[in-house]
Image (tube, grey):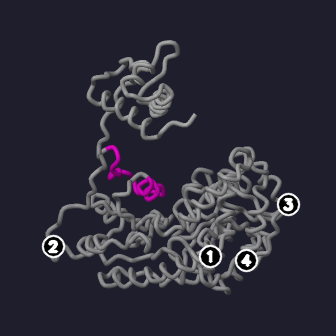
Amino acid sequence: MEHHPTLVSRVMADVRRRITARSLGPGAKLPSIRQMAEASGVSKSTVVEAYERLVAEGAIVSRRGSGFFVTSHSEPLSLADIAPRLDRAIDPFWVSRQSLESGAQMLKPGCGWLPPDWLPQDDVRRALRALARDNQASLSDYGTPLGLPALRQLLARRMAERGIDSAPDQILLTESGTQAIDLLCRLLINPGDTVLVDDPCYFNFHALLHAHRANIVSVPMTPEGIDIAAFEQALIGHAPKLYITNSGVHNPTGASPSLQTAHRLLKLADAHDLTIIEDDIFADFEDEPAPRLAALDGLERVIHIGSFSKTLSASVRCGYIAIRRDWLDRLVDLSIAISFGASRLSSEVVLRVLQDGGYRRHLQSLRGRLGRARTDVTARLNDMGIEPWLKPRAGIFLWCQLPEGIDAAELARAGLERGILLAPGNVFSLSRTAGRYMRVNVAQTGDPEIFDWLRAATMPSDRRPAQSPPHTTQLAT
């Protein structure tokens, strides 16, 4: 039986008001279903539905044979409870925790994703509605061990556009790009094994590798890709088993590898029996694909991974791994053991969005919008003495050097107090040599308040104006 949502909500609101006003105190018994129905002028089934929803919320509890009772009162929500922790150590989790824990009131030039209105939300809604209408097993069943066949076929075609020759039966779907790396670390390394990363690199690489108790060694980045001379010395001196890097658009620097650097890197990897994980999560931001190690290597010692959290939706968790066939069975076993395979529902949503011509149009529009944002933000940062390390060809990030004497970590702490989340350079740098750098997300840096505050905060102290009140947003009541 269906219930009028307004009537159900009205009954729920009445109970909540009584609880708030303390006319129904902790442990108090609610009116019976019949009494509430008569008092409210609604059907008994409407009251049943309202009470069940309040039970689900935790506002009341059902006691079999006795009725419904008020639970203990929750403490009022405090701003201190939801505010970012200013005393948290600036480590690989710092930006992630601050980004995820802060609400919509926080300005986030340091976070790693696009604003919601930059994503194809209408396409995702259409895909979800279509799946709901179809009433297929995708709404309830587990997926197959490798993941949705139609999506793997589509991914193989998309990788071919970047020169990567991968058959659908070489592709394993995962819950995310992060889970893909976690699975591969479980497959490829043991505690104490050495793993190479770029310096700087995506900070969660550090966190994942620490979780696997790896010995992490970093190699400096250049605008043309990894520093090949330093890379060779690390291979000779540390005998690493694995190297994890971004392809196409590097996080956080925005660099793209040159073809010469890619060839030399693969030649060294072959000579030293090194396996490479190539994270291609930013692939769809590129107009013209940069060289892919997996394309040059043919998936022999390079494993190619990706996901759609940056350009489609971070809520639709779906990643993938393209890998040589003789490694695949063990990887599938790990996937089943850890998560029983990828989400079938998420895979179906991604497939439907990618098959829709609207996604390609979305990407074309998004690339243009990002290009304009990179130009605008670069000019405004340069104007205040904050200099991007290079001009990226694509992507959402600028890797910026702060003026002399400005420490990025201290600036980030001051930013939190102001309601502005920054990404200080040393969270990306294993060697901690990026104290004057920060990563800027151009898509999240449109609010003029960010530039006004940065200009004042990086200005010599004897020239700074008086501080205006901090950025705040009232909580909805």
Q: Which residues are magenta?
A: 81-100
Disc sitting over residue 465 in the figure: 2
Q: In this rendering, is residue 334 above or below 361?
A: above
Distance from disc 2 to disc 3, alpha carbons, whole Å, reads 64 Å
Disc sitting over residue 266 in the figure: 4
State the quadrant of the N terminus: top right
**Which residue is most to the top?**
65
Of tags 1 and 4, the one toward the viewer is 1
**Mark 3 and mark 4 in contact (Cβ < 8 Å)?**
no
Of tags 3 and 1, the one toward the viewer is 1
Helix, strand or loop at mark 4: helix
Q: Residue at x 47, y 57 (%)?
A: 96
Of tags 2 and 1, the one toward the viewer is 1
Distance from disc 1 to disc 4, alpha carbons, whole Å, reads 32 Å
**Mark 1 and mark 2 in contact (Cβ < 8 Å)?**
no
Q: Name the N-terminal-most of marks 1 and 4.
A: 4
Give the residue at mark 3. 326
Q: Nearer the viewer, residue 378 or 263?
A: 378
Q: Name the N-terminal-most of marks 4 and 2.
A: 4
Give the residue at mark 1. 360
Residue 93 drawn in magenta: yes
Q: Amino acid at mark 2?
A: Pro
Q: How many numbered marks does the figure carry?
A: 4
User: Residue 441 at what x, y percent from top left?
Assistant: 44, 71
Q: In this rendering, is residue 250 above or below 331?
A: below
User: Residue 154 at what x, y percent from top left?
Assistant: 75, 68
Residue 224 drawn in magenta: no
Q: Residue at x 36, y 24 (%)?
A: 39
Question: Can you see residue 385?
Answer: yes
274 lies left or right of 33? right
Of tags 4 and 3, the one toward the viewer is 3
Helix, strand or loop at mark 3: helix
